[in-house]
Image (cartoon, helix red, strand yellow):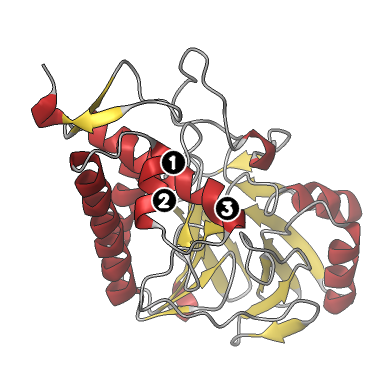
Amino acid sequence: MAEIDAAPDFDPALPPPGRMVALGPLVRRRVAPNGGPFTASGTCTYVVGHGRVAVIDPGPDDAAHVAALLADLGSEAVAMIVVTHTHRDHSPGARLLKARTGAPIVGCGPHRAARALAAGEVAHLDAAADRDHLPDRAMREGETLSGDGWTLVAVETPGHTMNHLAFALPEAEALFSGDHVMAWSTSIVAPPDGSMRAYMDSLDRLRGRSETIYWPGHGGPVRDPRRFVRGLANHRRQREAAIRARVAAGAATIPAIVAAIYQGLDPRLEGAAALSVFAHLEDLVERGLVVTDGAPRHDGVFGRAEDAG
């Protein structure tokens, strides 16, 4: 799930849904037919290995997508079903696939929020959270899955959701980056489910890794990922600076900030932009750079720290 907030280096190329494509000796992809402004051309479901395979992110609650995936695999067996995070465009299909194959669901743990709701606060992403996800095995940093000629290594990348995992495939120098890093758009980070501070920390951790390509949850591959992740972090810092500047100029509410810095935005994406601004403001308040009355709220009033008191 993403917001349309593309930096200049983002690649708009989108893989088409509806067919299995080989991406290399160990990786295949089928894109679910759930395209839209937040999902690009659809959720990317990946197959790792041959014979006995791992399926990463079976996608939404779409029996036809799961049936088409199994038809593509033919006599191959699904050995494990791997989930990066609990949004409804990624994880519900895991339960459908398990019902058809008996394979265990592994990867991220149950959905959890970054923090509790403040008094009177509405969880704006409630509809996106898959609260029915219950894996057979919840994985942590560095834990592995393996098959014939392949290994998947869990990489904890909280931020977009707090249970978000990426998975490294050392044999291909690749990383399945889920919704944490995508080539077509930035990711939504929406409190209380997500945390901008955790997201930025996860970006910093990825910059030290050696993979040469990322396969994301939506859109095409991220090439030269270390340079890309550095640019993505810089883009977020520029967005933060723009928000601080608008607050300093007197834009005290999230709608006012969105109107000032997302000019010409597709109206369908205004909610996503507001959530992103809120995530930045929450982080800025925590760091003492912006003030508000009490805990940060989506309908709150914000001001410069210099003006407080």
Could you tell me how far apart the alpha carbons at marks 2 and 1 are, in whole angstroms?
6 Å
Which residue type does callout 1 highlight? Pro
Q: Is residue 206 left or right of residue 17?
A: left
Marks 2,1: beta carbons within 8 A: yes
Q: Give the residue at mark 1.
A: 255
Q: Is residue 8 left or right of residue 63?
A: left
Which residue type does callout 2 highlight? Ala
Which residue type does callout 3 highlight? Thr
Q: Give the residue at mark 2.
A: 259
Rendered location of residue 64, percent (x, y): 90, 63
Provide the secondary structure element on which disc 3 rests: loop
Q: Is residue 79 above or below residue 86?
A: below
Q: Give the residue at mark 3.
A: 84
Where on the picture, by quarter, is residue 223?
bottom left
Of residues 101 and 203, the one nearer the viewer is 203
Between tags 2 and 3, which lies in front? 2
